[in-house]
Image (cartoon, helix red, strand yellow):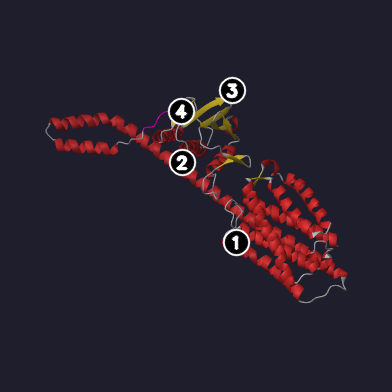
Amino acid sequence: MDYIILLFSCIAEYLIFSDFFDAFLSIRPNFQPIWNRILIAIPFIGIYFGINTLQISYLNMISFICLLLLYSFLYEANFKERLLYIVFLCAIFFGCEFLFVVLLNLPAYLFHSSSVANLSTIPWQIFTLKLLTYLICCLYKQTSVKSAARMDRKIFACYLCIPIACIAMMLLTYYSGLDFASSPRMRILLCVFFAIMQFGNILIFRAFQRYTEQLNHNLQNNLIISDQSLRLSYYQKILTMDEHLQELVHDTTHYMKAIRILLDDGHPDQALALISELDTKLDTTILTRYSKNDILNAILTEKSELAQSQNIQMSIDVLPDITFAELPSADIISILSNLLDNAIEACLARDNSRVVQLTITKKNENNFYVIIVKNTYDKAPVLRDGQFVSTKTDTKLHGIGTKSIRHAVENNHGFVNYSIEEGFFVATVVLPIALNV
């Protein structure tokens, strides 16, 4: 029975500190698959369990710190960050143990350097200790701004009702003076149900986290949809303005004749009024014709003017017969606008050599559209979860543009790839034409 409780304790501690690291740090891509994490967990738990069976408390504490340090190298972080979170975890774990020694007046042999701990005599105290440790870690995880699973205060307050009630029940069981020594079966059942209660709290917290992640995911999807709608509306307005401009250019000859007649007849005031009317109809937005797709022309015209205003050298090479007729206008806007916005923003971080290069062509016997955007950058982007992530300060909703690109590309059965080549950040989008017809 002692070894079963000890094994449960080791598994619980591993789950608690691994979940804690997940909230604050990003695990390396090689260790992200669930089966890889299970394969990592087995030797960690086995080693920790084996050391604990030696029943030397100081060795247990040292081994726990060493295992935390070793486990932290699975995450992408510098040594100072790892050390900081290890110190926090040690403070939580050791602090909870010493707090329980005081509150529950646990036997002193549990902390002697050469103790032989009879854990079966204090099973519910052990479960209560682990649950309290997990609860404090959950409270601390709420301070993480990097985690998309960080709960809203109201949702977290609802969750707290469950572990607080469980801890209270465990403490009341202890202080009630119930004696199960004469009933081994009842003691075993109590241990089993307390263990289920412990893992139930962990699973419930995970469920609340999943709910929070889903809320964030839905929020991001709504932002993407809103962004697409706004951009589409914007570019449609540009097209309308361009049509009006073409009509105005056509009518300019009539205006000039009317102005000349008014001046010849000695009516300068009316001529000036006509000039003023003509001026109000003029618009500075002149659409450059890059392709046969008006939405594409509007996007490239706007981004070209934006790059020019920011002293960015932007080159645009578009195959003249590109139509994107097979693709929804909203997806064209999501892909190109976000790609070019990201490229321009990366260039703005540099003091010189600001370059953006766009190429749109067809490949493989005109069966695929290929969009390539290259740009110079100041700092190399960070690769996380197989994607380059944003370095913006708004970490809660960072990378919306990148997610919008991926969503639009996948919606059209294509793929997007990011790489760094010869000092340029390169984004390549491939979209099959046949599947979209």
Whether residue 291 can be seen here: no
User: Which of the two residues, 66 or 398, is positioned nearer the viewer here?
Assistant: 66
Image-quadrant location for residue 309: top left
Whether residue 407 can be seen here: yes
> Dot 1 surroundings within 10 Å: few (below 14), some, or many (20 or more)?
some
Q: Which mark is residue 365?
A: 3
Q: Nearer the viewer, mark 2 or mark 1?
A: 1
User: How far is the residue under mark 2 from the one under mark 4?
Assistant: 24 Å
Element at badge 2? Answer: helix
Disc nearer the start of the sequence (2/3): 2
The amino acid marked with disc number 3 is: Glu
Residue 122 percent coordinates (x, y): 80, 68
Reading the image, the residue beneath label 1 is 155
Main SS category, magenta section: loop
The magenta segment: 286-291
> Dot 2 surroundings within 10 Å: few (below 14), some, or many (20 or more)?
many
Residue closest to the far top: 365
Q: At 83% across and 61% down in the image, what residue appears?
A: 114
Disc nearer the start of the sequence (2/1): 1
The amino acid marked with disc number 4 is: Ser
The amino acid marked with disc number 1 is: Ile
Q: Nearer the viewer, mark 2 or mark 4?
A: 4
Reading the image, the residue beneath label 2 is 232
The amino acid marked with disc number 2 is: Leu
Reading the image, the residue beneath label 4 is 315
